[in-house]
Image (tube, grey):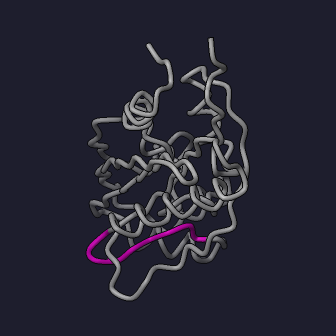
Amino acid sequence: MSPPPVLILASGSPYRAELLGRLRLPFSQQSPDVDETPRKDEAAAPLAARLALAKAQAIAERAPGAWVIGSDQVCACEGRLLGKPGTRDKAIEQLQFLSGKYAAFITAVALHQHAGATHRDFDTTVVKFRKLSDGEIVRYVDAEPSFDCAGSAKIEGLGITLTAEVQSRDPTALIGLPLIATAKLLRKAGFALP
């Protein structure tokens, strides 16, 4: 019996690692160094797909033979792309913009093997944000700094209080790794899952 294929998560995110751990496959985790700047006129879905693949490719180059999972999430609202805010002021500004609006969170996943195959998929979750006061936004940002979350809302934590509605076919996608799509890609690559 041959050993199971090597699996690497191309992410430093503890949220993505926790999600992938639910599939009960052995994996390691490495952070890719990828420029996440959108290209001119790049839409949300192509941006998320490009970055997910770029992350997987960056790690796969260092680990020939391993399968590497890359994932990326972009928040889109009224034609504007909202990535990771990075700072308190930017998080507050993003949430002020999202207040009372619908936003689409596009989460792409790529499974890549250097000099091998690439499998890709994505999931879209639509979130309606409540009408938020400036005070609510500041209290949220101070209580749960979500500077590493697209759109500044950590939905798996206190960020759920910012929402009025979440429309999703895969609740894990909003946290950062769509497990339904990921499991499908892993099966396609030969990983044994239930």
Q: State the image coordinates of residue 132 (x, y, percent, origin top left).
A: 41, 61
Residue found 38% across the figure and 67% down from its top: 98
Q: Is 15 or 164 nearer to us in this picture?
A: 15
The quadrant of the image that shows the N terminus is top right
Determine whether, in the image, residue 173 is placed left or right of residue 92.
left
**Number of marks in the image?**
0
Determine whether, in the image, residue 158 is placed left or right of residue 14.
left
6 shown above or below 74: above
Q: Is 149 or 124 nearer to us in this picture?
A: 124
Residue found 63% across the figure and 51% down from its top: 10
Q: State the image coordinates of residue 91 (x, y, percent, origin top left).
A: 56, 69
Q: Which residues are magenta?
A: 77-85
Determine whether, in the image, residue 163 is placed left or right of residue 8.
left
192 shown above or below 69: above
Q: Is 150 or 178 nearer to us in this picture?
A: 178
117 shown above or below 189: below
The quadrant of the image that shows the C terminus is top left
Q: State the image coordinates of residue 95 (x, y, percent, origin top left).
A: 46, 67
Based on the displayed image, in which of its 4 quarters is residue 42 positioned? bottom left
Residue found 38% across the figure and 49% down from its top: 120
Q: Is residue 163 magenta?
A: no
Q: State the image coordinates of residue 171 (x, y, percent, origin top left).
A: 39, 35
